[in-house]
Amino acid sequence: MPKTCAFCDGENPLTKEHVWPSSFLERIGKGHAHYSPKSGRVHGGDYIVRDVCQECNNVYLSPLDEYFCALYDRYMSTPFGANSSVTLEYDYDMLCRSMLKIAYNTARSAGSETEPFHRLCDYILHGGSCPDGVALIAELVSPSYIEDSSGPVVKVKEVLPWMYRSIRAGLMTPNGNAVLARIVAVNSFFFHLLLSRNSEDFNCFELAKAEFLSKIKGTVVLNKNAMEVNLRSSPQDSLRSILPLLVKKKDQYSNFFNRRK
Ligand SMILES: [Zn+2]
């Protein structure tokens, strides 16, 4: 059976597609390392998938990359300090489709769950009205504070969230299983995507969404009909969400950077 495009299901020739927009990777430089659960190894941040046809890639998906980069330039290129606030102006469809695209690309490249994305592909490609069972939730995370005990006096060090990640999350609430939860994080901005696993009945999805909002403080559901949102630093810091992985894979990370030198 010929391989079909992951977005349009067509049998057109497939091309290379960057998981993160290449224009974004050019902006941030290539000195980043990510751990891949699929290969069990740490490698560079420039993931590639090879299952997107040329038309989807160049005609329908590349405007999403441009939109994402413009937003990055305007708001996200520098992390925010503690107790910040920002008014994010956005185009809901462009933002939501950009985030879905990055999350779907990552999920395929990581061999992770992709099923809830399938019914959204037409929306990701062509826009229109966002299907039910999708929540896009924004958060401005706080810097991390860690104890530095290398000197004679223990000091508290502020660590700003310089990072970008597209990861799967687990929602450990009574209805958490009703959704696939993913995070697309760029420096201080975390975009949480909740996608209903049931494509017809969205009751449990709505319950899971409410549980998420009451559990993760300072997060705001982006309104489909609004054009801006006010975000204030949330009680969560970004480092805590990935720290367990960094500690567990510490040797692999240092090997990776040593090889690069
Ligand atoms: Zn296609």
Image: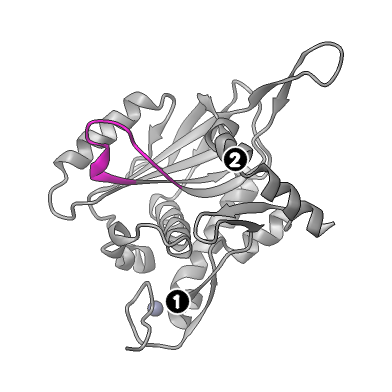
- Percent of width and height locating residue 66: 56, 62
Residue occupying the point 44% across, 35% down: 229
Name above or below for residue 183 compared with residue 59.
above
Residue 42: horizontal and vertical position, in percent? 63, 55
Element type at marker 2?
A: helix
Frontmost residue, 138 versus 174: 174
Image location of residue 138, percent across then percent down:
44, 38
Q: Are marks 2 and 1 in contact (CB under 8 Å)?
A: no
SS at mark 1 in the image:
strand
Residue that badge 2 annotates: 248
Amino acid type, callout 1: Asp
**Depth order, front residue of 258/181:** 258
What colouring style does the render use? one colour
Q: Is residue 179 magenta?
A: yes
Residue type beneath disc 2 = Lys
What segment carries the magenta color?
Answer: 168-180
Measure the C-alpha gap from mark 2 to mark 1.
31 Å
